[in-house]
Amino acid sequence: MSEWARENVPILTALLSTVALALVFGAVGGAIPSSLLPRASDAVLAAIPHVNAAISATAIGTIALGWRAISRGNVARHRALMLTSFALFATFLAAYLYRLIHVGTASFPGPELVYTYVYLPFLAVHILLAIVCVPFVFYALLLAATRPYEDLYHTR
């Protein structure tokens, strides 16, 4: 990657994070009209949550294997697994947002008490952590892309 990118990882992190979160908030907030995207069949739209569950399980596996690889000093395997994890995350998010734009949100099927005192607090924590992790993910990817492995121990 260019020397400019190497010297401006925080700026690139902020830019990528802003664009990514703007797309997410735009989709969630209804600012992205469904007419901009071709509509898949109802069967495909119904399958997306199930596919996303499989993607999530696979991503958990690739993250765990990547952690194991780096703890054993296998940098190449770690890099491949972390890039796979990121690709899985991006695929999950794209599918989720695509379905959200075309179908909207689903209503909570359980009791009101569970919705209010269990589901909403978990959802709030999930959303907060998802937002907070975006810059960290981009920062780590950009550091890894702009520096040799040996230099990473000397970064902030």
Image: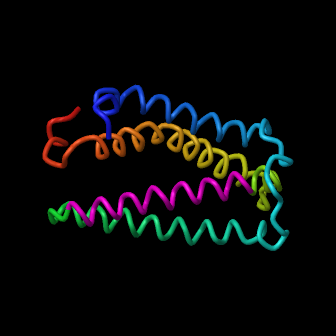
Q: Report the residue at 81% width, 73% height from top.
A: 43
Q: Is residue 37 above or below residue 125?
A: below
Q: Is residue 36 above or below residue 8?
A: below
What kind of secondary structure does the magenta stretch mostly adopt? Answer: helix
Nearest to the observer: residue 153 or residue 54: 153
Q: Would residue 148 appear left or right of 36 to someone viewing this image?
A: left
- For the point 48% across and 37% down, the residue is 132
The structure residue drawn at horizontal position 79% and vertical position 56%, both measured from the top left corner, is 106
| 83 within the magenta span | yes
**Which is more toward the observer, 21 or 120?**
21
Picture residue at 30% right of the left edge, 40% below the top: 143
How many numbered dots are placed on residues in this image? Answer: 0
Assign the C terminus to one quadrant of the image: top left
State the image coordinates of residue 67 (x, y, percent, origin top left).
28, 61
Relative to 22, does residue 111 appear above or below in the rendering? below
* Above-or-below relation of 105 to 68: above
Q: Residue 77's x, y, as percent?
A: 26, 66
| Occupied quadrant, residue 94 | bottom right
In which quadrant of the rendered image does the N terminus lie?
top left
- In this orientation, which residue lies closer to the viewer: 102 or 127? 102
> From this viewpoint, which residue is outermost toward the front?
2
What's the coloring here? Answer: rainbow
Q: Is residue 138 left or right of residue 33?
A: left
Q: Is residue 115 magenta?
A: no
Q: Position of residue 76 (x, y in %)?
A: 24, 63
* Residues shaded magenta: 75-98
